[in-house]
């Protein structure tokens, strides 16, 4: 459910991140003498983390969109009720004027 252009850019981004982490691990080894292994599993974990984050954000966006739509419906309903009450007041105004006059 992702267009091909976005998917290909995302693949390139994940590859670039993986390469940069590999380079940073080499710098880490050179500077501190400690090994940090970057494996294909690390790459798969990056993709899994991205997918989890993407699903979470999509769910969050869907919930926010639904809240927004419900709010719009309530505002429209309230506007219709106010318009109905205003029409009712206009219709009752002559009776009110008569009652005040008596």
Image (tube, rainbow, N blue to C red):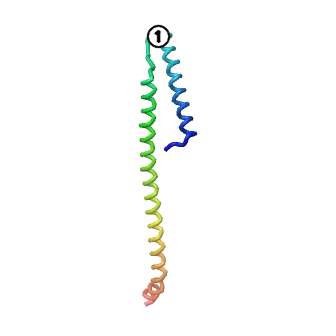
Q: Residue at x 46, y 57 (%)?
A: 69
Of residues 81 and 63, the one nearer the viewer is: 63
Of residues 45 and 72, the one nearer the viewer is: 45
Q: Up-down: is 75 above or below 42?
A: below
Q: Up-down: is 19 above or below 97?
A: above
- Mark 1, Cα crowd under 10 Å, few <14 / some 14-19 / many 20+, is few
Residue 78: image location, x then y, percent: 44, 67
Residue 81: image location, x then y, percent: 44, 71
Compared across the picture, whether 60 is left or right of 3 comes to left
On-image quarter of the C terminus: bottom left
Residue 62: image location, x then y, percent: 44, 49
Of residues 68 and 38, the one nearer the viewer is: 38
Q: Up-down: is 89 above or below 2?
A: below
Q: Residue at x 44, y 17 (%)?
A: 37
Outermost front residue: 4
Which SS class for mark 1? helix
Residue at numbered disc 1: 32
Q: Residue at x 45, y 88 (%)?
A: 98
Of residues 76 and 47, the one nearer the viewer is: 47
Q: Up-down: is 62 above or below 77?
A: above
Residue 2: image location, x then y, percent: 51, 42
Outermost bottom residue: 102
When asked about the image quadrant of residue 56, the answer is top left
Compared across the picture, whether 52 is left or right of 30 comes to left
């Amino acid at each position: 459910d992702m267009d091909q252009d976005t998917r290909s850019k995302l693949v390139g981004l994940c590859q670039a991140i993986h390469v940069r982490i590999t380079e940073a691990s080499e710098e880490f080894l050179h500077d501190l003498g400690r090994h940090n292994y970057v494996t294909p599993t690390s790459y798969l974990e990056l993709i899994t983390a991205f997918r989890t984050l993407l699903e979470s954000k999509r769910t969050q966006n869907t919930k926010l969109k639904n809240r927004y739509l419900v709010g719009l419906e309530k505002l429209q309903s309230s506007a219709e009720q106010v318009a109905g009450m205003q029409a009712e007041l206009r219709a009752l105004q002559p009776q009110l004027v008569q009652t005040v006059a008596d």
